[in-house]
Image (cartoon, helix red, strand yellow):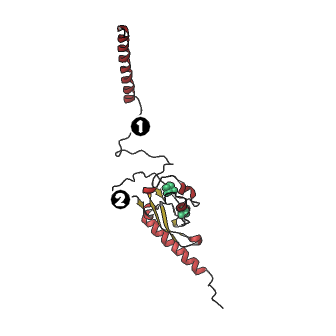
Amino acid sequence: MRPSNLVADFFSGFLSFFKGLGVTFRNLVAREKITVQYPYERIEVSARYRGLFYLPYDEEAGRLKCVGCTLCEQACPTNVISMTKLGAGKNAGVSEFNMDLGRCMFCNLCIEACPFEAIYMGPAYELASTKRDASLFRIADLAQGGRPAVEANNRNIQAALDAAAAAAPPKEGPA
Ligand code: SF4
Ligand code: SF4
């Protein structure tokens, strides 16, 4: 290699070094910070974020919107969802609704399958735990309003079922 090229390479490398330092310095002082000091700082997630599921509570009806039709359970490819139906007909609901999120892909198929807008994913994302059974979320963990909402749901559905049974015409026995 000729000496003149060596000198040119030296200055070119030297220039590149300072160009790189310039980029670092610009990012250090002039650019808006996009990192946060998690867990001391938290960013607000998008409204469309697929976090922990929740079961909406209908304030007017005093119950969860879920009617226990099992369409979400059937749509789930990894058997995350199981439930216990409460009652039948137009007053039907659920007394238990379990989701094992250890198997969940957050694919949204269950939500798309629900005809009653009775299940959604919310913004909660801190689901990690050292407990073996922490991936299992029961109805009180999922219901909007927690345990009191589940108790009101069960009470009001049962009351509606009792009222419907009392209003039904008596069944005719065998002649
Ligand atoms: S998001 Fe997908 S994998 Fe998770 S419960 Fe719903 S259907 Fe199942
Ligand atoms: S969440 Fe929706 S699809 Fe699933 S059981 Fe309830 S009403 Fe049916």
Q: Nearer the viewer, residue 124 or 137?
A: 137
Residue 91 in which image quadrant:
bottom right
In the image: residue 65, left or right of residue 18: right
Q: Nearer the viewer, residue 85 or 155?
A: 85
In the image: residue 19, left or right of residue 56: left
Q: Position of residue 84 (x, y in %)?
A: 49, 69
Q: Amino acid at mark 2?
A: Arg
- The tag earlier along the polypeptide, 2 or 1, is 1
**Residue appearing at x 35%, y 41% in the figure:** 37
Outermost front residue = 1
SS for dot 1: loop
In this rendering, the answer to whether 3 lies above or below 49 is above
Q: Position of residue 134 (x, y in %)?
A: 38, 59
Q: CA distance from mark 2 to mark 1?
A: 34 Å
Q: Which mark is residue 17?
A: none
Q: Position of residue 9 (x, y in %)?
A: 37, 14
Quadrant in the picture for the N terminus: top left
Q: Nearer the viewer, residue 72 or 140?
A: 72
Which mark's residue is nearer the viewer, 2 or 1? 2
The answer to whether residue 28 is visible is yes
Q: Amino acid at mark 1?
A: Ile
Q: Which residue is mark 2?
A: 132
**Residue appearing at x 37%, y 29% in the figure:** 29
SS for dot 2: loop
Q: Which mark is residue 34?
A: 1
Q: Quadrant of ligand 2?
A: bottom right
Q: Position of residue 26 (x, y in %)?
A: 39, 26
